[in-house]
Amino acid sequence: MDLASIGYETQENPTGGGTSNHFPSLPYHTYKYDLFLAMGYPLGSYGCFPSGLCGHLLHPLNPAVVSNTGLMSTSEGRGLFRLAVECALSNGQYVEYTMLGRTITYTGMGLMSTTAGWFSKSLTTAQKEDVFRCVIARINAFGEQVSIVLSGQNVRDQRDPNDQTPLQPDAFWDVKITPIFGPYGTYYAIDEYVWPLSMIGGNGVSSCVHSTSDMSMRVCDEDPDCGFEIRTSPTDDCIKSAYPGEDDRFYYTCNTGNPLQGRPVVQSWASGEGLAILNPQCLGGVEPELIDIDPTLPYIPSLP
């Protein structure tokens, strides 16, 4: 497959946001609808300062997020919430959740450029999709810590310009939220899409017969019906912008859903070592053991 036909380069140092891929995919699928509900509320709480001035947003987490979703009731849900806050809020923005006398702080990493307003207001559908795109680019079934860089039209450019670590393309990620109108009200479908790039020739590997199974394990754990659509035709689905944006960067949009429409996907990048961990069958890495999550445990150290 000739990825050069969409302007794809096998080696480059992208601008964007540095982060990690580490969150297990099973808790993501368990709590993604709770996350969707949580994004329908502002994160901050309105209250009074010690001076008596009232009506200002404060940092304690909005009680509606706690009472109207199941997100904060387990360590897995709180772990997914942490991931979403890191993606959505700007550097320095934070909210605090107090549980059993312990206050937990969730701090933004400023990864997405469109979603910092979540602190003070609910997110639009497009903004929710941006948070989800960032989140799904950071999940894997093994719970392994892998350093990655995210880039894309709505990803904030904050990578250290002196970081010259050679990176290779990993995947395009998209989430589409669709309202479904029925006789008993409206519900929302959350559809996830991924185009595995490194596993179909983008990093010099001419072929990889295990690419689909690798990515399926990564995003679905051991559930083949998790809902992710793994697409292996980026040359048909995705287009690189003809001209750079205001920040002199080119972006990709991909056609997903029905009707097909160009959507601002998030692209993930990783080192060769990182890709070998994320895609062990394809790239000759040592396959890690799947982490075994016991939902009855009150606390999982890897998911604070």
Image (cartoon, rainbow, N blue to C red):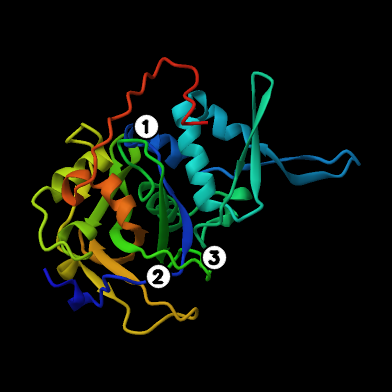
Mark 1 vs mark 2, CA separation in Å? 31 Å
Residue at x 45%, y 69% (from the top left corner) = 15
Which residue position is annotated with label 2?
13
Q: Nearer the viewer, residue 295 or 115?
A: 295
| Pointers 3 and 1 in contact (C-beta within 8 Å) | no
Foreground tag (3 vs 2): 2
Q: Is residue 257 visible?
A: no
Foreground tag (1 vs 2): 2
- Coordinates of residue 290 in the picture (x, y in percent): 28, 30
Residue at x 35%, y 60% (from the top left corner) = 269
Which residue position is annotated with label 1?
27
| Three-letter code, disc 1 | Pro
| Pointers 1 and 2 in contact (C-beta within 8 Å) | no
Residue at x 48%, y 24% (from the top left corner) = 74
- Coordinates of residue 240 in the picture (x, y in percent): 29, 75
SS for tag 2?
loop
199 shown above or below 42 = below
Q: Nearer the viewer, residue 77 or 179?
A: 77
Q: Earlier in the sequence, mark 3 or mark 1?
A: 1
Picture quadrant where residue 292 is located: top left
Which residue position is annotated with label 3?
158
Q: Is residue 79 visible?
A: yes
| Three-letter code, disc 3 | Gln
Residue projecting furthest to the bottom: 243
Is the residue marked by circle 1 packed among few (<14), some (14-19), or many (20+) residues within 10 Å?
Answer: many
Is the residue marked by circle 3 packed among few (<14), some (14-19), or many (20+) residues within 10 Å?
Answer: few
